[in-house]
Image (cartoon, grey):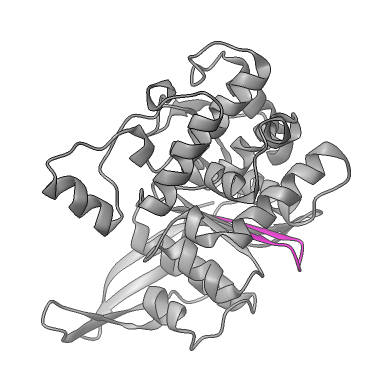
Amino acid sequence: MTAARLIELWRGGLRESSHLGHVVISDANGIVEAWGNPGAVIYPRSSCKMIQALPLVESGAADQAGLGSEHLALACASHNGGRIHTERVAAWLSALGFEEEDLRCGPHMPRDPEEHRRLLCSDSRPCQIHNNCSGKHAGFLTLKRHMKAGPEYVEIDHPVQRAVRRAFEETTGETAAGWGVDGCSAPNFACTVEGLAHAMAGFARPGAGARGQAQRRLVEAMLAHPELVAGEGRACTELMRAMKGRAVVKTGAEAVFVGIVPERGLGIALKVSDGGTRGAEAAIAALLVHLGLLGEGDPVVRKYLTGPLRNWRGLETGELRRAEGFPV
């Protein structure tokens, strides 16, 4: 099956661009709705951070370290690197006796405007805590400490990554189709879009036992702290705020998005084939409207989907549209 046309850009009455991709909405019993090829194999990238955080909670490492819901939200985050994020990650590391040098994610300039400006104006360099994945890596370090394992926790054969792979394969219901190195240096395991949606459905309706309790705690943490999961001006934070605790959404690089809808027991996974953020954000907004989680006139829907596109002078130049048949 080929990719489906999901989102289109129209300018001057002509369709200028199309974003094609694959989408699955799943419940515990399987596919509820799909567009494109559910069997398309993808890297979930950062959209699966709640899966990568499962061993942290399920093993008892989080409780042993005294982690709260803010820590768990940061473990699932692709944050902006603002002070609201970096101060919490730094305190987390310090409380466990770790230093910034113990991280293996690498530094990059933060997306947060104030922190970005502070670093530029002070002629300072960013550190690894500014990395959008530093919360996930703090979680890896916490699990490494609990396991009494070695320092190179991003290596594929390290006990931390073996635990992550096991959680990934068990929640997706698939043997990983392969793995690659993510932007933060951690392994990222491949699965189908259907498998990723299946995993998210498991978080939406967790079962009993340590696994279900861990899934529930991670979802509750993300719902409670949308500002920590991404940051101001980011789609994940703004969409979750607009839904007022009804669903989790999480993006990943190369235009992946997932959703967790506890009240319906639904998991969502989408991949836009061109890797463009614009298409992925518009597609997840369209799906949230389709599922009744957001209204068509909500400001966040206008921002990411239905509002006009404007140029630098503020002139209306075009619009994004749902492609015919998406969603039905």
Identified at 42% across, 69% down, the residue is 282
Q: Where is residue 143? Give x, y as percent.
A: 62, 26
- Observer-nearest of 221 and 211: 221
Give the extent of the magenta segment: 260-269
Chief secondary structure of the magenta span?
strand
- The answer to whether residue 26 is above or below residue 97 is below
Identified at 25% across, 38% down, the residue is 126
Identified at 61% across, 29% down, the residue is 176
Residue 188 visible in the snapshot = no
Residue 150 visible in the snapshot = yes
Q: Where is residue 321? Give x, y as percent.
A: 39, 78
Relative side of 326 to 148, left or right: left
- Which residue is at the far top? 150
Identified at 57% across, 14% down, the residue is 158
Q: Where is residue 172? Give x, y as percent.
A: 68, 40
- Across the whole image, how many numbered discs are drawn on residues? 0
Q: Where is residue 303? Give x, y as percent.
A: 38, 77
- The answer to whether residue 218 is above or below residue 126 is below
Relative side of 28 to 57, left or right: right
User: Which image quarter holds the C terminus?
Assistant: bottom right
The verdict on residue 267 being magenta is: yes
Where, by quadrant of the figure, is residue 246 drawn? bottom right
